[in-house]
Amino acid sequence: MHTSLVCGACGLSHAIDSPQNLCVQCQKPLLAQYDLASLRGRFTPDVVRQRTERSMWRFWEVMPVDRPSEAVSLGEGLTPFLKCQQRGSFRKFSQLYIKDESFNPTGSFKARGMSAAITLAKALGIDHVALPSAGNAAGAATSYAACAGMKCSIFMPKDTPPANIIECQVGGAAVTLVDGLISDCGKLVRDGKEQFGWFDLSTLKEPFRVEGKKTMGYELAFDMADALGQRELVLPDVVLYPTGGGTGLIGMWKAFDEMEQLGWIDSRRPRMVSVQAEGCAPIVKAFQDGVEFAPLFPNAATIASGLRVPVAVGDFLMLRAIRASGGTALTVTDDELRAGVLELAREQGVFACPEAGAVWWAAKKLSASGWISPDERGVLFNTGTGVKYTHLDLATTGTTTSDCDPH
């Protein structure tokens, strides 16, 4: 169980026994802290390996519960770690892997964050949550709220993929479609919070979605060790991550720090790469400009819903991690990410979301420039299933029709 909640910007501590959103002093994200010194030596990788929990909650000592049975869980986490086959566009990469988050409940990595956030909301007596979402977070929030017996209100841009909208409606959420961006949806959530008493479950505007997402970082160390056939935990050289709100990138960086304090790994870190769409790239621009905070990105537009986040409250935390790791940030076009989806499907058998197409195309760019070498251990994050995005005009190449009766 966490022992404190500390602002990631000013360091102010907040009570852990009452619902919290942003820091009351500077309005920046709060981060959960644990008594890692007392866990060192008794919470070890071997202890984790011996457990039978088939979810991310096998790491419960560094999660916001006293025991795994307290979790609101649908079996999230422990997703596949796939080595890319050296063929086609992937031929030059000898140690490239895909962390395939599409196997999570509701089909994306958002399940991890919502499991942790809803777990704490339930424990603190919250009965109605609300959030803005451009896609997968909405479905995850709906499902985990239903599992916990809570009410859920979702505000989504009206051009959100239909599958995400239907998923929320079927799950019983109150869905409002908004003529605008996710930032416009967020304003409506804030208004409703004041008027109706909803708890705001927006990205990084509560402390625990990041706790669920950080388990991707813990799993990476086990995944990489298993891939190399060794017991000692090891991290990859490079992590390429599609960045919208950035909770996953921030969470993994937090996990690496916790694992070092626990004595599981040394101080070496992967170079963290933030990938955004050319039409919505606030973090890339801030990284290139050398600033700490990312201003609102004007006229944000991309077919990758998860990347269409024009402003992020955790911007400074993302930028700190990227810079501290010696990483970088870059953009791809919508045409490039579409092509990336096709190559992942046709050359690796992974029907990935558009955000993963962006990550793969970014890897190709970084390889061409020499920033990634062919023998480095790199991880591409496929954050969700491509099935929810079948409305996109990907391609019809190779499609044939027949008048023959299949029977």
Image: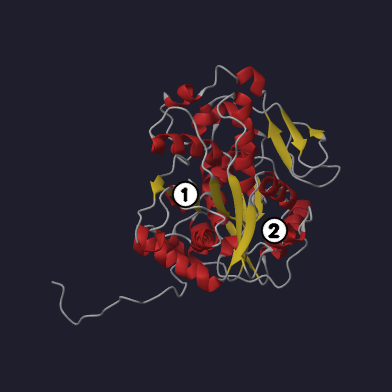
In this view of the protein, can residue 285 be seen by the observer? yes
Q: Nearer the viewer, residue 36 or 274?
A: 274
The correct choice, above or below, for 389 with respect to 66 in the image is below
Quadrant for residue 401, please give it: bottom left
Q: Residue at x 55, y 39 (%)?
A: 217
The correct choice, above or below, for 404 with respect to 23 in the image is below
Q: Quadrant of the C terminus?
A: bottom left
SS for dot 2: helix
Q: Residue at x 54, y 56 (%)?
A: 136
Q: Which residue is mark 1?
A: 101
Find the distance from the CA under tag 2 to the CA under tag 1: 23 Å
Q: Nearer the viewer, residue 7 or 283?
A: 283
Return the mark for residue 283.
2
Which amino acid lies under the numbered mark 1 shown in the image of this protein?
Glu
Q: Residue at x 55, y 70 (%)?
A: 303
Q: Residues within 10 Å of mark 2 (few under 14, many from 20)?
A: many
The correct choice, above or below, for 400 with respect to 97 in the image is below
Q: Position of residue 199 (x, y in %)?
A: 70, 47
In this view of the protein, can residue 17 be seen by the observer? no
Q: Position of residue 264 (x, y in %)?
A: 55, 27
Circle nearer the viewer, 2 or 1: 2
Q: Position of residue 270 (x, y in %)?
A: 58, 43
SS for dot 1: helix
Which amino acid lies under the numbered mark 2 shown in the image of this protein?
Ile
Q: Position of residue 208 (x, y in %)?
A: 65, 40
